[in-house]
Amino acid sequence: MPRTASLPLLAMLCLSLFGCATAPGTQPDPRDPFERVNRATYRFNDAVDRAVLKPVALGYRKVTPRPVRTGVSNFIDNLSYTTTIVNDLLQLKFKPFLQDTGRLVVNTTVGIGGLFDPATRIGLQKNEEDLGLTFGHYGAGPGPYIVIPFLGPSDLRDGIGRVGDIFTDPRHYISNSWVSYGLWGLQVVDTRSRLLDSEKVLEGAYDRYAFLRNVYLQRRQYLVTGGETSKQQQQQEQQQYEDEKKILEETEGGEQPQTPPKANSPQGPQPGTPGQPTEPAPPRSNEPNPSPVPPQPPPPEQPH
């Protein structure tokens, strides 16, 4: 087995050996039975990112002009685009297969090895396919959510798919180790540099781990179904949202107090309410009686 394929398999094997548990004080998520191990792996990945990857990405962005960074991103995307083409064919998507093949040819030739992206300008848009999406296309469920060391969020289906995707990437067949590892390292730096602008989204997240997990699973489900979500998934997402909202309210000091009634608002049943007698209000002292008695005429005077 290639050296690059051993890491995802080792991570999934380790996950299968640990007990299932969830973080204390949170509602267990059925999609994440290995939450305790996943959170530990997430903290490890986050520490590596803060110590190594993020500083390198910041330095790369600081010393590299934007046009050069764009060219590197185009080159990396074009280099691994064979994975999308192969999975188009595996899913029997013949029209996207022809479009993606044309995109690869145009960008490799006219775009000078993929440094430029003329294919997008002529209407050949970029697609995203991989073996995990192919498994999902044929009905395979995502399985449990897992966090792979150094690689980040995944699930069992996508973790297995990542192993297969290695064999559809041209870098796997480069015999020169310096070139092969250099290209993989360039992809890591380029990917981390692209994510720098999205970190602001995480600043307001109460639980970054749960936020990233939900974003990853929802995005992968969207790619598999083309935007169509099942009723069961909608219920799970709604339940997850309510649980996180409840935890946030408890953390901020409990439930919000009910709004007290206004001083001039009536407290009892309103007049005219069915089943309640309606009594007329007594007249004010400075107002005439609402039902006055007609005055009697004076008696006639007697003649003297």
Image: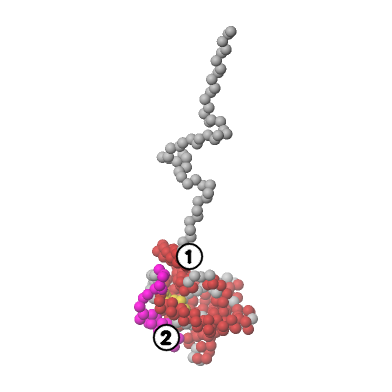
Whether the magenta-drawn stretch holds residue 24 is answered as yes
Query: What is the magenta segment's predominant secondary structure?
Result: helix
**Residue 61 relative to residue 128: left or right:** right
- Give the percent coordinates (x, y) of residue 96: 50, 72
Q: Which residues are magenta?
A: 3-27
Q: Earlier in the sequence, mark 2 or mark 1?
A: 2
Tell me, what colour scheme is on the image?
Answer: secondary structure
The amino acid type found where label 2 is placed reads Ser
Q: Secondary structure at mark 1?
A: loop
Could you say which disc has been placed on residue 253 in the image? 1
Residue shown at 52% from the left, 50% from the top: 262
| Quadrant in the picture for the C terminus | top right
Residue 36 lies in quadrant: bottom left
Q: Secondary structure at mark 2?
A: helix
Q: Nearer the viewer, residue 106 or 233?
A: 233
Residue reaching furthest to the front: 304
The amino acid type found where label 1 is placed reads Gly
Residue 13 lies in quadrant: bottom left
Q: Nearer the viewer, residue 289 or 163?
A: 289
Could you say which disc has been placed on residue 215 in the image? none
**Residue 89 relative to residue 109: left or right:** left
Q: CA distance from mark 2 to mark 1?
A: 47 Å
How many marks on residues?
2
Q: Nearer the viewer, residue 155 or 83?
A: 155
User: What residue did someone put label 2 on?
Assistant: 6
Whether the magenta-drawn stretch holds residue 61 is answered as no
* Label 2 Cα crowd, 10 Å radius (few <14 / some 14-19 / many 20+): few
